[in-house]
Image: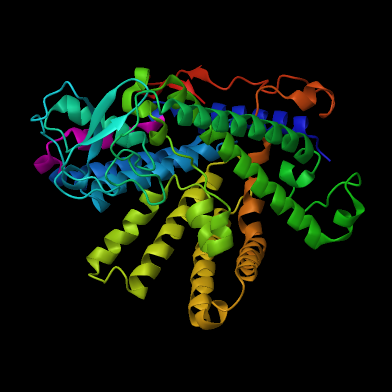
Amino acid sequence: MTTYRELVNRRQAAFDTAVASGAISPFVFPADLAGHALIVLYLLLPPRYAQKLRVVLLPAALWLYARTMLRARSTSLANGMVIGLACSWCMVWAATLMLFNNVQRDFRRLERRSWREKKEEKRGVSSIPAANGLGEKLIDASDELEDYQLSWQAFPTSVGGRFSWAMELLVTLRGVGWSWQIAGLPPVPPPASRPKGAAARPAEVSLRRSLFNYIFSYLVLDALKVLLMRDPYFLGFIDEPVPPSFPRILRASPWLTETYRLAMTVTGIYMAILSAVSIAPLVFVGLGPRILGLKGERWMNPPQLGSFQAVLDHGLRGWWGQWWHQSFRFGFLSPGRWLVGQCRLDGRSSAAILIRLFTAFAISGFIHASATFTQFAVGTWPLGCFLFFVLQAVGIAGQSGCAYQAAGVISKLPKPVRQLSNVIVTLLWLRLTGPLLANEFARGGLWLAEPVPVSPLRGLGLGLEGEGWWSWTEPFARWYSAPVWWKSGIAL
């Protein structure tokens, strides 16, 4: 059996050969994200021109992202998975901003004003209700520095103001501090009634929680890496049994073997997400509003992952709609809402609900299938990822429909019984459909990626032979010189 290090070295050699032959190209920043420029251009244009030119700008942006997915590859970036994930998401986000929503008319952004500013300067203050309940009236807030006002800023008239909007809309995901903030996030704080400095304690709590989550997820990822590299499944050989060193109960039952591997896959993905989403609060809340202004406020950096209580209460719908991260929620829901509007359906009708549900999961399937497609591997089946997410919509619709039909019986059951049944149904459905996703992640080489730069466990001698403290043995980025200058840049 090929060892982990042999496989990594062999894959890197094959990648270098493919690049040299011109079969593929490395992912180069910023050339391979040229579609960003068209999104920014659209947002910089005056509204009357933007709406007319989007018929050109949107297809051009989609083509640029699709071209990158077709030809760019990497042995870093989770073995190329991030390329497909980023480009497909940018395609969805470009359509969200240019087609499915009217940014210039409907979007509002919170801005912070000192009490010293004139109250009559209300240009850009929204007169329509926002997602978190704010309207035209300015509200008061407080941080550890001073009292200030929050107001809704409409689409700016100046180019500089529109550029600020464009750059923020390009990277924002959940809409915190925007009128389109996704459901489930804390609202903007009510008028302050506490003395200055009272917000410091919640900020410290937020920092401690984020720091704990980051350290905990870091250590778990290190332990998982040491463990998973001993299983050929996570090296990409998905049909191989677990090695003899594993417990006999796993080796004796193919069903338990697959269940164990699915559990490790979910744990690894969850911990990777937890590690990634813990960094932003550490930076933004750590620097605080004194340096970053509104972006440094604790309530502008709410948790990315929900409580497992949602799964107990709502089953599979709670798993995907509240417990799992909601980073892409607005982009997933916008196409379905747009379709419902185009079909002139009642938003509360069963047809509208199903359209939004299946559209959201189909888009999620497209993004994850694209991520598998751009992995530098042979024999992957991206359709499996797509089917997995579409089947989640089937499961949610099925569980919700059964619960509706049996509501009279279910309501009489004790709450612990209802919650236990929700968990059982959720886990069984994920166990049934999970291999469609997990097998493609493993086959594509996701687990060959090094999640931590410094490995305490491998430094203590618990890793494979030849491994030590430092895990990132290959450079993450290098300069790439292309035949034409605009294609040169940082190869990742």
Nearest the eye: 400 or 254: 400
Q: Which secondary structure class fits the magenta region best?
A: helix
What segment carries the magenta color? 32-50
Question: At x 60% / y 19%, what residue is drawn?
Answer: 475
Q: Is residue 164 shown in magenta? A: no
Say above or below: 235 vs 397.
above
Q: Position of residue 47 (x, y in %)?
A: 12, 41
Determine the image quadrant of residue 352. bottom left
Determine the image quadrant of residue 275. top right
341 to the left or right of 464: left
Q: Position of residue 182 (x, y in %)?
A: 36, 49
Question: At x 19% / y 31%, what residue is drawn?
Answer: 162
Q: How is the image coloured?
A: rainbow
Q: Position of residue 289 (x, y in %)?
A: 36, 22
Determine the image quadrant of residue 77. top right
Say above or below: 345 vs 212.
below
10 to the left or right of 372: right
